[in-house]
């Protein structure tokens, strides 16, 4: 759908590191091919095909109930925990279908970590929260591992010297960065983030956005967000799901926000529906 020249629907100003990232060629690390997901007989995703590029930020946007979280949970098989959920089609990570019988979901979740909407640290010390990320995978965590993960989550400077205090005593934004530290401790390749800033105040949210930009240097990030400005600011690629769990458009973020192909996408982005 063409828009008037020089009139983007949403401004997609990018930071310098995003420009560096955008200049890198896309190398697919994760691909959904004709993916269908059902809850009982109800389809939540229909015929979704998408190629997620390595070390870039891919945003998943769309109205409530269109299957964004379902898609994210399909990638690291969190949907396995829902009895009525059934997956058809392919979800290939580094050439291997994650639904193959010989894939261990726990090992998969080490490589494909997840951060949720509401910060959910355990009622344990900051150190134990981070160590858990490794210990759940059967590895022990050294002080260096803990420091490295906290540094990676841009939290170290705020918690150095109080690693034994409770993770629950941190602010909401710090708790979310602690959850990110827990997710990156086992050194995953992919980080799935399900609306990671929607429970935070704008300052805390902005810190997480900056952090996501940093994280994309080391990890491939897939983020679900309701906030279109956020998707425009931080992502390289954007996938737009619309009602019925269909992927309507997937392209460079600038293209999606400045000149989408589909009228439904333009209507969604300009707030005409959704
Ligand atoms: N555990 C479940 N059991 C049955 N149906 C479910 C379950 N989880 C999600 N659904 C249904 O699947 C569809 C997609 O839900 P999903 O949570 O993936 O959408 P979403 O786009 O992430 O929504 P939101 O933006 O509101 O979080 C919805 O119709 C929802 O009701």
Image: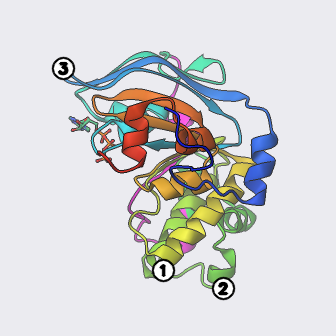
* Cα gap from disc 1 to disc 3, whole angstroms: 42 Å
Front position in the image: 192 or 130: 192
Precedes in sequence: disc 1 or disc 3: 3
Front position in the image: 110 or 213: 213
- Is 104 colored magenta in this rendering? yes
Left or right of 147? Residue 208 is left
What label sits on residue 170 in the rendered view? 1
Which of labels 1 and 3 is toward the front? 3
Q: Which residue ends up furthest to the left in the rendered image?
A: 41
What label sits on residue 41 in the rendered view? 3
Ligand 1 resides in the quarter of the picture at top left
Query: In terms of secondary structure, where does tag 3 sit?
Result: loop
The answer to whether mark 1 and mark 2 are in CB contact below 8 A is: no
Residue depicted at 44% across the width and 66% down the height: 121
Residue range in magenta is: 102-129
- The residue beneath circle 2 is 161
Residue depicted at 53% across the width and 31% down the height: 250
């Amino acid at each position: 759908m063409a828009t008037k020249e020089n009139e983007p629907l949403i401004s997609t100003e990018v930071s310098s590191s995003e420009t560096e990232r955008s200049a890198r060629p896309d190398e697919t690390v994760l691909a959904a091919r004709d993916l269908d997901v059902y809850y009982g007989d109800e389809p939540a995703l229909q015929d979704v095909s998408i190629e997620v590029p390595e070390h870039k930020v891919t945003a998943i946007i769309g109205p409530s109930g269109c299957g964004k979280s379902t898609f994210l949970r399909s990638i690291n098989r969190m949907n396995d925990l829902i009895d009525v959920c059934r997956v058809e089609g392919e979800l290939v990570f580094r050439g291997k279908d994650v639904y193959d019988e010989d894939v261990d979901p726990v090992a998969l979740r080490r490589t494909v970590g997840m951060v949720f909407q509401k910060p959910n640290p355990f009622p344990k010390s900051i150190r134990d929260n981070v160590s858990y990320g490794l210990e759940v995978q059967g590895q022990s965590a050294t002080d260096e591992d803990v420091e490295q993960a906290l540094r990676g989550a841009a939290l170290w400077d705020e918690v150095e010297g109080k690693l034994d205090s409770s993770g629950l005593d941190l602010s909401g934004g710090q708790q979310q960065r602690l959850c990110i530290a827990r997710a990156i401790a086992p050194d995953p390749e992919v980080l799935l983030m399900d609306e990671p800033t929607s429970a935070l105040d704008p300052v805390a949210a902005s810190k997480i956005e900056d952090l996501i930009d940093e994280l994309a240097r080391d990890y491939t990030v897939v983020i679900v967000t309701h906030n279109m400005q956020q998707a425009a600011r931080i992502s390289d690629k954007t996938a737009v799901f619309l009602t019925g769990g269909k992927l309507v458009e997937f392209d460079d973020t600038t293209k999606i926000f400045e000149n989408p192909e589909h009228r439904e996408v333009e209507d969604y982005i300009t707030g005409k529906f959704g």
